[in-house]
Image (cartoon, rainbow, N blue to C red):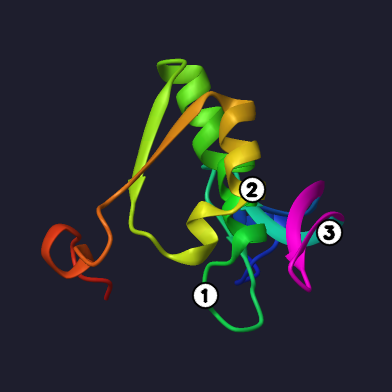
Amino acid sequence: AQQCGFNESNGWISLVWRRTVKLKVKKQLVACDVVVPYLKHQDGTIITIQNRAWMDTIRLCMFIDLQLGPYYSAKRGRCACVWDNCGPHLTEGVKDFADEWGIALLTLPKNMTDVLQVMDL
């Protein structure tokens, strides 16, 4: 019988993302070495965790580095990402990763999220 769950027989492998990310620590910009475990399926799906269950600067950098950047690099060679003015979207760390992959970051006008963005579910 085939095992159920997130294992190699079901196409999953356990990996670790290690990068240096610029983060604000006590109002100072600091280069931090981060280590984030994640699972990757053979179809390219990635699962990771964040202890507060929301997207933070580190996970956005990881998303750009593991999914968005490689996808558009292989397909078109360029990308524009449009999102709201949420704090983690506008950090130096995220901007650095986007620049590294040639991704243009664009934001919706302030206080317009409820009008211009599809509601988060």
Query: Mark 3 — residue?
Result: 35
Residue type at mark 1?
Trp
> Quadrant of the image for the C terminus?
bottom left
Whether the residues at callouts 1 and 3 have beta carbons within 8 Å, the answer is no
The magenta segment is 19-32
Residue type at mark 3?
Val
Q: Quadrant of residue 101?
A: top right
Residue at (85% x, 56% y) in the render:
32
Query: Mark 1 — residue?
Result: 54
Q: How crowded is the residue under tag 3: few (<14 C-alpha within 10 Å), some, or many (20+)? A: few
Q: Nearer the viewer, residue 64 or 115?
A: 115
The verdict on residue 24 being magenta is yes
Query: Mark 2 — residue?
Result: 92
Q: Position of residue 39 (x, y in %)?
A: 67, 58
Cα distance, mark 3 to mark 2? 18 Å
Q: Nearer the viewer, residue 116 or 48?
A: 116
Residue at (64% x, 74% y) in the render:
50
Cα distance, mark 1 to mark 3? 17 Å
Count of labels shown?
Answer: 3
